[in-house]
Amino acid sequence: MLYHKVESDLDEELWAMILENEGREFQTLRRLSFTYTVKTSGKGEQLGEIIISRKTKTITRATILLAYRNAEVVMAAESFVKGPKKLNVFGASYLYPIFLKLGLIKGQRDIQ
């Protein structure tokens, strides 16, 4: 069952990176370690969400894509993304360090 409408190649590439890094350790800006897993159905089908280990909350694939698109807009205007709030989505405090570690965005520290 498809839970997410694929909008572009970017969507596919971004989701592939998310899948490849499942279980990898990340840190929030407050240095709290976390991992994520991709949510699956009882039949093992991917449901288009990630589950953050620290909160047991899910972030949808659509939210991840929206966060990345918001980051692209900020990067175009400012050349870096100052912090999670700039992503303007639920779960930004987790998505921001994921994007940084995967090299998808630059943070303020990266340009100094």
Image (cartoon, rainbow, N blue to C red):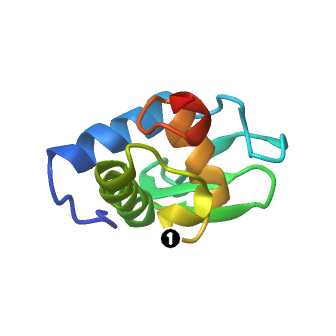
**Element under label 1?**
loop
Q: What residue is rendered at 57% in x and 41% in y?
A: 108
In this figure, which residue is indicated by the disc labeled 1? 88
Q: Up-down: is 54 above or below 26?
A: below
Residue sitting nearer the eye, 59 or 99: 99
Q: Residue at x 32, y 55 (%)?
A: 77
Total labels: the figure holds: 1
Q: Residue lying farthest front?
A: 112
Residue 112 image position (x, y, % from top left): 57, 29
**Nearer-the-camera pick, 32 or 78:** 78
Residue at image location 45% in from the left, 29% down from the top: 103
Q: Position of residue 50 (x, y in %)?
A: 56, 53
> Would residue 111 appear left or right of 65 to someone viewing this image?
right
- The one nearer the camera, 9 or 51, is 9
Q: Is residue 40 left or right of residue 36?
A: left
Q: Nearer the viewer, residue 100 or 4?
A: 100
In the figure, residue 92 lies in which quadrant? bottom right
Position of 98 relative to 72 (above/below): above
- For disc 1, the neighbor class at 10 Å (few under 14, some 14 to 19, many from 20) is few
Q: Quadrant of the N terminus?
A: bottom left
Question: x, y percentage for residue 21?
Answer: 53, 30
Q: Which residue ends up furthest to the left in the rendered image?
A: 8
Point 45% across, 36% down: residue: 19
Q: Return the x and y of residue 40 as percentages of the image width and height.
A: 52, 53
Kind of residue at badge 1: Asn
Q: Is residue 34 above or below residue 65?
A: above
